[in-house]
Image (spheres, rainbow, N blue to C red):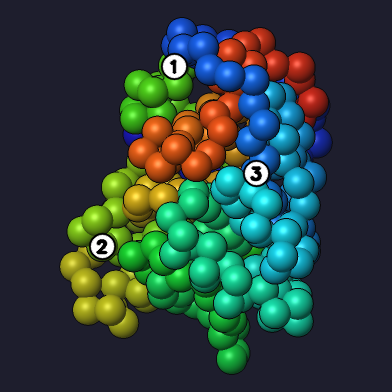
């Protein structure tokens, strides 16, 4: 990969617009509603990103609210805190049922941990998982808050479907990484792990415990059926292509089931910039 994993300081307010989307077919004006789990974390940023592409996002805090949405985003945040709040509100059973319905679910950062079948590097006592993604996630692979960084990550499938650059500027904040994936999981993005980095120590520890051969990269974005997972935070950038990709997953479900109203994909034009990209 051309870019290196480098630390960053989140102090600048430089804005970037991605406008090179492929031509999109005309669809009916959207009545689609996408839920965003709103116990903690970056749920407001996801709702703002959906708004920029013409899709309504609503906060989800109660089980009955899941009945009124076409898809669900589980945002980034502090995964242990989110899990405790979800358990307090008895959300784990309905979240698992929602996954089983086949409606699209996207987990970002902490949300990715929620969707994984297995999590490594848990705190004492661990945390409850929703599951569904056939993968093993290292809960805090990329270190602490001060080790947060940004990297230009190749995303060939995303660029092929959504246009724009062949890479995506990924924001990693206390981020997890996917260390193993099952045979039905499609890998959408990977990053290298430099041999002299603290991340390599985490990787070596896992490889030894899991009895795996050494590897020099980790997976940071996957798709399996109706489930999408990213270890980074697309909602903290002005590049809406991951949100567009997710909305198209919902539209694809409509094409096969006829049960979901399509979104207005013509809204994917020059967006109104609301969120910054933080440069290193």
Marks 3, 2: nearer the viewer? 3
Q: Nearest the camera: 181 or 103? A: 103
Residue on which the image places disc 2: 182
Whether residue 109 is visible, yes or no, is no
| Distance from Cα at disc 1 to Cα at disc 3 | 23 Å
What SS does tag 1 mark?
loop
Residue on which the image places disc 3: 34
Specify the quadrant of the image occupied by residue 156.
top left
| Distance from Cα at disc 3 to Cα at disc 2 | 27 Å
What SS does tag 3 mark?
strand
Residue on which the image places disc 1: 163
Marks 1, 3: nearer the viewer? 3
What SS does tag 2 mark?
loop
At x 31% / y 82%, what residue is drawn?
209
Q: From what the image shows, is residue 177 above or below residue 212? A: above
Residue 122 placement (x, y as % from top left): 54, 80
Q: Nearest the camera: 77 or 169? A: 77
Q: Nearest the camera: 71 or 123? A: 71
Dot 2: within a 10 Å radius of its alpha carbon, few (fewer than 14), some, or many (20 or more) residues?
Answer: few
């Amino acid at each position: 990969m051309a870019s290196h994993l480098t630390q960053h300081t989140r102090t600048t307010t430089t804005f970037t617009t991605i406008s090179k989307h492929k031509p999109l077919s005309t669809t009916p004006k959207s009545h689609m509603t996408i839920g965003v789990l709103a116990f903690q974390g970056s749920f407001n940023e996801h709702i703002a990103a959906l708004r920029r592409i013409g899709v309504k996002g609503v906060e989800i805090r109660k089980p009955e609210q899941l009945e009124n949405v076409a898809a669900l985003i589980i945002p980034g945040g502090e995964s242990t805190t989110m899990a405790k709040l979800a358990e307090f509100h008895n959300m784990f059973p309905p979240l698992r049922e929602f996954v089983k319905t086949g409606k699209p679910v996207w987990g970002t950062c902490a949300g990715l941990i929620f969707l994984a079948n297995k999590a490594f590097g848990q705190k004492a006592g661990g945390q409850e998982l929703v599951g569904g993604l056939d993968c093993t996630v290292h809960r805090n692979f990329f270190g602490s808050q001060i080790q947060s960084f940004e990297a230009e990550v190749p995303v060939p499938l995303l660029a092929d479907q959504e246009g724009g650059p062949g890479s995506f500027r990924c924001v990693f904040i206390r981020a997890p990484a996917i260390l193993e994936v099952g045979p039905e999981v499609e890998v959408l993005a990977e990053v290298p792990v430099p041999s002299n980095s603290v991340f390599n120590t985490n990787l070596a520890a896992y490889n030894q415990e899991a009895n795996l051969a050494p590897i020099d990269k980790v997976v940071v974005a996957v798709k399996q059926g109706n489930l999408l997972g990213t270890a980074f935070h697309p909602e903290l950038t002005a590049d809406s292509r991951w949100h567009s990709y997710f909305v198209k997953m919902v539209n694809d479900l409509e094409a096969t089931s006829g049960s979901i109203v399509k979104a207005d994909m013509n809204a994917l034009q020059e967006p109104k910039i609301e969120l910054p990209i933080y440069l290193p």
